[in-house]
């Protein structure tokens, strides 16, 4: 579900030092330092245009319950959250985003879909909560997608390098950089296509679920209707006959 | 475990640490639904951590049982893993697959009764992510890997689009079924209503004539 670019870029590097702190106690310090140096050097030879990650999940939210998902975000990035209710009677859910400092950024009540962008993001874990407590019986199937972009974003990959000077004598190096740069741009666009595809897929799933419900409902209520009609017909005839039977006995 | 192995594990771990996580109570099972087309290889990486991310003073024995169910609710795969691992499976039927996670940490853990957090990352398609590739070398090798990665990505998008087209056909079929069912039932109901009405009238008329009331 994500074709993630190879991940030796900046957000990961930040984590290395956190890891360093927690691993120090177990004495892996020297090995980790070597790794950090290697990664740092790799970073120098790889242009990072801003890492983009996305997660998309579909899950079943029981009636009367609430579920929270957490996403770690770096400082000054962007986070885009999109959700849709794809099945369930009523097709709506409460949605909340809570920042790492426990401020409720977005509160939505009984919506069936929504898109939100949080920018700039604070460092820490964002809480994304779906609440179905207003519904007593119907469980909802909710699809959501979180797209995290760290600093740098995915804007203008072409313009960024327009000012790149062609170094003398290293034409081959420049051509390779050129190729790599267009591939990065291609990768970003493909990522975007994939994200759009996911969204469209969610729309289709929702429509299909709705239609299957409709089909079942139509069949059920038609049968019920026919049965009721027949019952009523027989009851009417029987009642009228009964009326006259009694009267006749009374007369005699 | 050589340096490269450590590199790979470290990368997966780090990427997972930045991935999304949710809370899992002890012995609680949570399921994720994924729409997967036929014959697609799915890889899932997960990492189980205690909720408070305290440093491990005793290291509790954490384990996750991963159960994968196919669209007919039959179990496709059910395995037990440690707290940081990956699982793979190939979907044989198109449709909604259920990936369920359940912890069965032993009761010896100090964190009994507390929540655990499960970092999860599910990838689809054969990925040519090769973290062991030595990126410090050749630009050409890097380019080759990148091209392969792009090809994978495009294949994945194309596959998903085909799958989407299949589903749209099913959708259209259901739609037409519903439409014809509605029409058919309406006709049946109207005819039943009319025939029952006539039958009632006839019976009552015969009845009244028999009782010499008319």
Image (spheres, coloured by chain):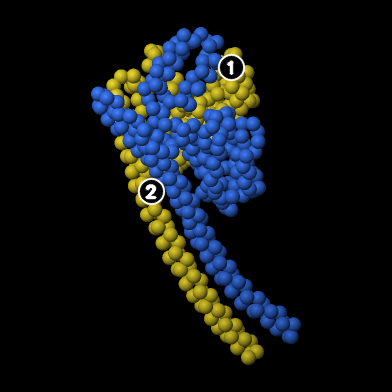
Chain colours: A blue, B yellow
Residue A168 appears in view: yes
Quadrant housing residue A125: top right
Chain for disc number 2: B
Q: How many labels were placed on the picture?
A: 2
Q: Which residue is drawn at 62% across and 86% down?
A: B208
Residue behind mark 1: B55
Q: Please, is residue B156 above or below residue B50 in the view?
A: below
Q: Which residue is drawn at 51% across and 8% down?
A: A27
Q: Which mark is residue B32?
A: none
SS at badge 2: helix
Quadrant for the C terminus of chain B in the image: bottom right
Residue A238 in the figure: left or right of residue B171:
right
Question: Helix or strand or loop: what does disc 1 sit on?
Answer: loop
Residue occupying image coordinates x 36% and y 51%: B165
Residue A87, x across and y down, in percent: 52, 49
User: Do the residues bearing badges 2 and 1 touch, measured as CB atoms within 8 Å?
Assistant: no
Taking the image as shown, residue A21 lies to the left or right of residue A180, namely right
Residue B129, given in percent of the width and then of the height, sits at: 36, 28
For mark 2, what is the residue? B164
């Amino acid at each position: 579900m994500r074709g993630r670019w190879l991940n030796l870029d900046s957000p990961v590097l930040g984590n290395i030092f956190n890891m360093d702190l927690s691993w120090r106690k177990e004495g892996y310090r020297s090995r980790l330092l070597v790794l950090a140096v290697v990664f740092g050097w790799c970073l120098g030879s790889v242009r990072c245009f801003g890492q983009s990650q996305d997660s998309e999940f579909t899950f079943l939210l029981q009636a009367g319950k609430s579920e929270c998902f957490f996403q770690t975000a770096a400082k000054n990035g962007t986070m885009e959250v999109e959700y849709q209710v794809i099945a369930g009677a009523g097709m709506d859910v409460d949605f909340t985003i809570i920042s790492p400092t426990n401020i409720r950024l977005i509160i939505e009540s009984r919506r069936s879909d929504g898109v939100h962008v949080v920018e700039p993001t604070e460092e820490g874990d964002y809480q994304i909560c779906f609440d179905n407590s207003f519904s007593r019986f119907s469980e909802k199937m909710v699809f959501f997608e979180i797209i995290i972009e760290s600093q740098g974003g995915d804007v203008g990959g072409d313009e960024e390098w327009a000012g790149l000077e062609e170094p003398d004598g290293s034409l081959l190096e420049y051509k390779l950089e050129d190729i790599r740069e267009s591939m990065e741009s291609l990768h970003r666009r493909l990522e975007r296509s994939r994200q759009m595809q996911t969204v469209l897929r969610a729309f289709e799933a929702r429509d299909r679920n709705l239609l299957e419900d409709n089909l079942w409902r139509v069949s059920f209520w038609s049968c019920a209707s026919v049965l009721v009609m027949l019952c009523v017909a027989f009851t009417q005839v029987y009642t009228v006959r009964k009326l006259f039977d009694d009267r006749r006995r009374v007369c005699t | 475990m050589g340096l490269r192995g450590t590199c790979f594990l470290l990368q997966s771990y780090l990427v997972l640490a930045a991935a999304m996580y949710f809370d899992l109570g002890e012995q609680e099972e949570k399921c994720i639904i994924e729409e997967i087309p036929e014959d697609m290889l799915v890889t899932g990486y997960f990492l189980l951590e205690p909720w408070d991310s305290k440093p491990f003073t005793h290291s509790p024995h954490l384990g996750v049982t991963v159960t994968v169910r196919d669209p007919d609710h039959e179990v496709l795969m059910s395995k037990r893993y440690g707290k940081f691992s990956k699982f793979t499976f190939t979907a044989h039927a198109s449709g909604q697959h259920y990936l369920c996670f359940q912890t069965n940490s032993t009761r010896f853990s100090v964190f009994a009764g507390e929540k655990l957090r499960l970092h999860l990352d599910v990838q689809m398609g054969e990925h040519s992510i090769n973290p062991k590739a030595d990126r410090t070398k050749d630009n050409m090798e890097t380019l080759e890997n990148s091209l392969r990665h792009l090809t994978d990505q495009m294949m994945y998008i194309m596959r998903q689009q085909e799958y989407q087209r299949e589903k749209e056909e099913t959708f259209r079929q259901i739609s037409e079924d519903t439409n014809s069912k509605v029409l058919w039932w309406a006709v049946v109901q109207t005819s039943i209503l009319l025939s029952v009405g006539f039958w009632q009238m006839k019976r009552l008329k015969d009845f009244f004539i028999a009782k010499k009331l008319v």
